């Protein structure tokens, strides 16, 4: 029988592990966060859009971050919508591609169909080994888009396909995903700040 004290200690270890990874990111990786934010802001300023893709929990993170751009991140920043799209939202296309071709090519096909030169693709993979994300990143670069990776572990094969990337210093999926959403929120907040400062976005009074 597991005692409550053991469970509490387990929870404390998980939280401390998450804090430790984030502290490493804070100490060593702000530059990558700033570079990614500047890349997204420049893309949007030039009339481009941001595409997001991931698998499993990372697919949910892709939707989460796209929503932060499409709607808003902070309640006091009531600004215009920013063009963004999570590529896993269309279940008919997703299942048709998986059935007729393979799941590995779905994000690649979506990138070819929806991406344009100057757009940005953000591929999220905790292992850096997901074949469908790697193919999408390659497709993005082939279309003269910017390929951005939110990765984990050692970056895996996906790292070589990225123009910009942040590799979370952990091999634990949960800790990597927790850090990815923190990084994503930081990037989105900086994007808002950059575009508001340039006057590209307006902060409208709340209705």
Image (cartoon, helix red, strand yellow):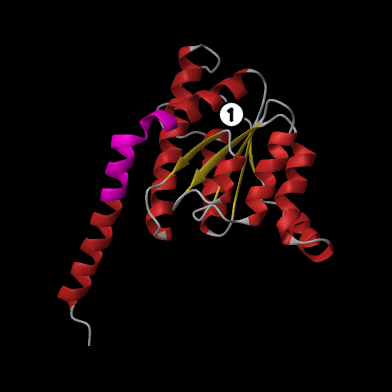
Q: Secondary structure at mark 1?
A: loop
| Residue 54 placement (x, y as % from top left) | 58, 51
Q: Quadrant of the N terminus?
A: bottom left
Looking at this rendering, what residue extends furthest in the left direction?
5
Badge count = 1
Task: Determine if the magenta segment contains residue 28.
Answer: yes
Q: Is residue 15 left or right of residue 54?
A: left
**Highlighted range, magenta:** 20-33
Looking at this rendering, what residue extends furthest in the right direction?
100
- Residue 142 vs 199, above or below: the answer is below
Q: Is residue 78 left or right of residue 9?
A: right
Q: Is residue 130 left or right of residue 180?
A: right
- Residue 80 vs 97, above or below: the answer is above
Magenta highlight: main SS:
helix
**Relative to the observer, which residue lies in front, 159 or 110?**
159
Residue plotted at (45% across, 35% down): 73
| Residue 113 placement (x, y as % from top left) | 79, 40
Q: Is residue 161 left or right of residue 169?
A: right
Label 1 packing within 10 angstroms: few (<14), some (14-19), many (20+): few
- Residue 21 vs 193, above or below: the answer is below
Can the viewer see residue 181?
yes
Kindly identify which residue carries mark 1.
81
> Which of the 4 image quarters holds residue 96?
bottom right
Can the viewer see residue 206?
no
Looking at this rendering, what residue extends furthest in the top direction?
199
| Residue 133 placement (x, y as % from top left) | 63, 50
| Residue 179 placement (x, y as % from top left) | 39, 47
Residue plotted at (42% across, 40% down): 183
- Residue 13 vs 48, above or below: the answer is below
Residue plotted at (43% across, 32% down): 33
């Amino acid at each position: 029988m597991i005692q409550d004290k053991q469970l509490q200690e387990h929870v404390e270890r998980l939280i401390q592990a998450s804090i430790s990874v984030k502290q490493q990111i804070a100490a060593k990786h702000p530059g990558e966060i700033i570079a990614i934010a500047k890349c997204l802001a420049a893309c949007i300023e030039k009339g481009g859009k941001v595409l997001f893709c991931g698998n499993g929990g990372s697919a949910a993170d892709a939707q989460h971050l796209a929503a932060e751009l499409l709607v808003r991140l902070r309640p006091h920043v009531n600004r215009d919508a920013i063009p963004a799209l999570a590529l896993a939202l269309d279940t008919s296309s997703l299942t048709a591609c998986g059935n007729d071709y393979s799941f590995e090519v779905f994000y690649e096909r979506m990138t070819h169909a929806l991406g344009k030169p100057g757009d940005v693709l953000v591929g999220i993979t905790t292992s850096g080994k997901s074949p469908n994300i790697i193919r999408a990143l390659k497709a993005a670069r082939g279309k003269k888009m910017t390929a951005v990776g939110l990765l984990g572990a050692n970056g895996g094969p996906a790292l070589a396909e990225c123009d910009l990337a942040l590799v979370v210093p952990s091999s634990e999926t949960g800790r990597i995903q927790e850090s990815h959403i923190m990084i994503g929120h930081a990037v989105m907040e900086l994007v808002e700040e950059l575009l508001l400062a340039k006057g590209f976005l307006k902060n409208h009074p709340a209705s």
